Structures are given as structure tokens and as C-alpha cells.
Image: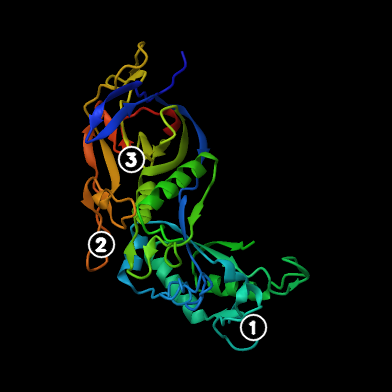
Amino acid sequence: MENKIVLIFVLAFIPTILGRNATTGTIVVDATTTIAETDENFVCFTLDIWPHDECRWSKLCVWDGHASMLNLDLTLPIMNKAVQAFKSVRIRVGGTLQDKLIYNVGAGFQGTCHPFQATKGSLFDFSVGCLYMERWDDLNNFFNNTGAIVTFGLNALLGKYKTQGIQWEGNWNYSNAEALIQYTVENNYQINSWEFGNPHISYTFINSFWYLDQLGMASMYNTKVYCRQTLIGGFYGVIKSSTLLPTPDYYGALLFHRLMGPRVLKIDNNVSSDLRSYAHCSRGRSGVTLLFINLSNATDFIIDLENNINLSSGKRNASKGQRVKIDSPREEYHLTPKDGLVRSSTVLLNGNPLETTKEGDIPNLIPVYRQSNSSIHIAGWSIAFIVVPHFVAPACN
């Protein structure tokens, strides 16, 4: 008999809870083998390069809060503590204008170092901009102090010329990039990798449905790193530049990073298209962590975890579908919007608002504990991370 571990919801329909329907279904997790594996630092954010006067979006200057890597105040406590909370998170530095950014370093650098200037008719409607090495020093001090793992986007168009449409030809002039890399190595800056480059709901809870669903789905297809545009700035930063407060997406990403390990497990979900479900080996410990996303406001889901292995004795049970009979608790992290409003910019963790301190400290993410053989309740319009530390998963050994 195949040694599979399953999570089973029994098909049923039960009376309404708090005015909503409560429904159960069947989900199977095969924890005997992995279907994909991500990088250890799957969650990633970007620091863009747009200057503060980039105002092309309906005359809205979305970068006027000085939120790019060229002008962001790197001494802000919230910026440092928000990144430090991940312990190690990948930050991609770059964006559209990286192909117009030069570096004032090396014998090959000529001219003076000017910031980007709006130049209508030029590529991306901006002139060439320049990165001072003093700023590069400051950035690397920030990366070192926060433990960030950095991917930096190099200028891939230097030396090339535009022929027609979006076609560029000619040989890449790598001397300026080489000088930057050499300067970086000489100063012992730890850039992990170098790369070439080839609207108003992102601050609210409703966007977390999309974002965490994308993280879960991307991991299933062997995606190694998923970079969110951006850490701060634009319409879509996980830290809002106007308030310097973390958004609901920030806390969702932080939980994903802390709880979901790189090994991805197969999960069959025949419950409802409104209930998204993903399973990973837990990060840094035994067992399995599940991510549930309930897209329905009208339906709650009641979940029973069942297992064909008798976890209390560690021996295989001949009866399939036997309830997990162990006394050890599981951890639950339930994210919901404040006052039930999905456009709220405040997220609740197990009913408590997540708010930074005046000093910019990120709040502790404290789970609730439930017995592993009890049912799981996924409320309407909610997101839940469920950590089952004693769930036997051979694929996670």
C-alpha cells in the first residue's frame, strides 16, 4: 500500500456560522515527494531607480516620497527593521531606468555625475542618470546592516544604439559595469548576484489575496525567486512611502518567508475555486505548513486533518482516513481585514491589529495554538497559515 499522507475534508454542509455558510470538502496532500523546490530566499522585493519627479501616471508623482534607491533615506528605523525582520531577504536593486544609469567610478568614466532629468522624447523620457560611489557605499552599509541578499541590475545598453522600434544593436560597453564590480569587490561589499534588465489597491488587504496566491502558485512551478515590485515606492510598495507603514502584503510576505520552506508538496483541491490551498515543508523544522486563501465572503470552510499514518505511535495504521490522534498543538496564523473591510490598510493577525511601534519595530507575529486533531476554521475573506509540526512528511526529511 502506498505510503501517502493525506489531509481530508469530509464533504458536508453544516449550518451557518455568524451569518455565513460553513462548508467542508476534500483536500489531499502527498507528502511523500516534492513537486518543486524554491530558493531558500524565495520572497524578494525590489528597490527601483525612478527619480522623485517621475509623473507619467495621470500626472501622479508616485515616487515623490523619495522612495528610490537613489534618494531613499536609508537611516529610517522602519526601513531597517522591516528588512531585518526577514533575517535574510533578497532585494533586487534596479528597474526600468537601470539601462540609463552610469556609475562614477573607474578610468573609463568621463564627464560629470548628474541625476536623472525628465527629457521628453528620450528613452523612457529621462536623460542618463548617475550613481555616486558615496551613495553606493551607503546602500551597501544598509544591505550589510539589514542582512539583505542583493541582486543588482546593471546597465545593459551602454555602447548600444537604437535602430528601429525597440531594437538595439551594437556591442555592449562593459567597462563601466566592470569598474563598479571591481570597486564593490575591493570594498568587500557582498552583492550576491548581478543581472541585466531586459493601481490604487496594493496597500489594502484585498491585494494580499492576489499576492499570496501568486507566491503559492509560482512556487509550485519550480520558480526559484519571486520579486515583488517594490519594497517601497510607486503604487505597489509593501511599505507605503507616504506613511512609512507596512502594508498587509508586507505581513503576508513575512509569514510566507518565515513559515513556508523551499520544498513544495502536491495538493489536490476539489473543494471550491474560492478556497486556494498550498502546502510546503515547514521552514527550519519538521512537519508541514499550509497556506489557505478564502476568496469567498459568503462561505467559511471547516477542515478536518486526517492521516493514514498513526502519528501517536509512529506506525502505519491499516485504516485509511483515521483522524490524527496526537496531543501536540499546531500553530495557526489567521489574517483578516480590520472591520471586515477588504480595502482596509490594517490587517489583523488572529483578531489583533498589526501595528509598528513609534520606534519602527515590527510587531511580533504570534500564532494561536490548536490541538492537531481539531478542525480548522477558515473564515470568509481570510488568509491562514497552518503549521503542523508533527505531521509526518517523508519528503521533508
Is 142 above or below relative to 127? above
What whole-number distance in Å separates the C-alpha atoms at marks 3 and 1?
Answer: 58 Å
Lower sequence index among marks 3 and 1: 1
Q: Nearer the viewer, residue 247 or 358?
A: 247
Determine which quarter of the picture holds residue 388: top left
Lower sequence index among marks 2 and 1: 1
Q: Residue at x 49, y 65 (%)?
A: 190
Residue under label 3: 297
Asked whether disc 2 touches disc 1, contact meaning CB atoms under 8 Å apart, the reply is: no
Determine which quarter of the picture holds residue 298: top left
Residue 11 at x, y = what percent? Answer: 35, 21
Of the two numbered discs 2 and 3 in the rendering, the one whose residue sits closer to the viewer: 3
Lower sequence index among marks 2 and 3: 3
Residue under label 2: 356
Label 3 amino acid? Answer: Asn
Farthest residue, direction bottom: 112
Q: Secondary structure at mark 1?
A: loop
Is 319 above or below relative to 112? above
Of the two numbered discs 3 and 1 in the rendering, the one whose residue sits closer to the viewer: 3
385 sits to left or right of 358: right
Residue 84 numbered mark, or none: none
Mark 1 burial class by Cα count in 10 Å: few <14, some 14-19, many 20+: some
Asked whether disc 3 touches disc 1, contact meaning CB atoms under 8 Å apart, the reply is: no
Residue 154 at x, y = what percent? Answer: 60, 68
Residue under label 1: 109
Q: Nearer the viewer, residue 248 or 373?
A: 248
Q: Residue at x 22, y 68 (%)?
A: 358
What whole-number distance in Å separates the C-alpha atoms at marks 2 and 3?
Answer: 28 Å
Determine which quarter of the picture holds residue 329: top left
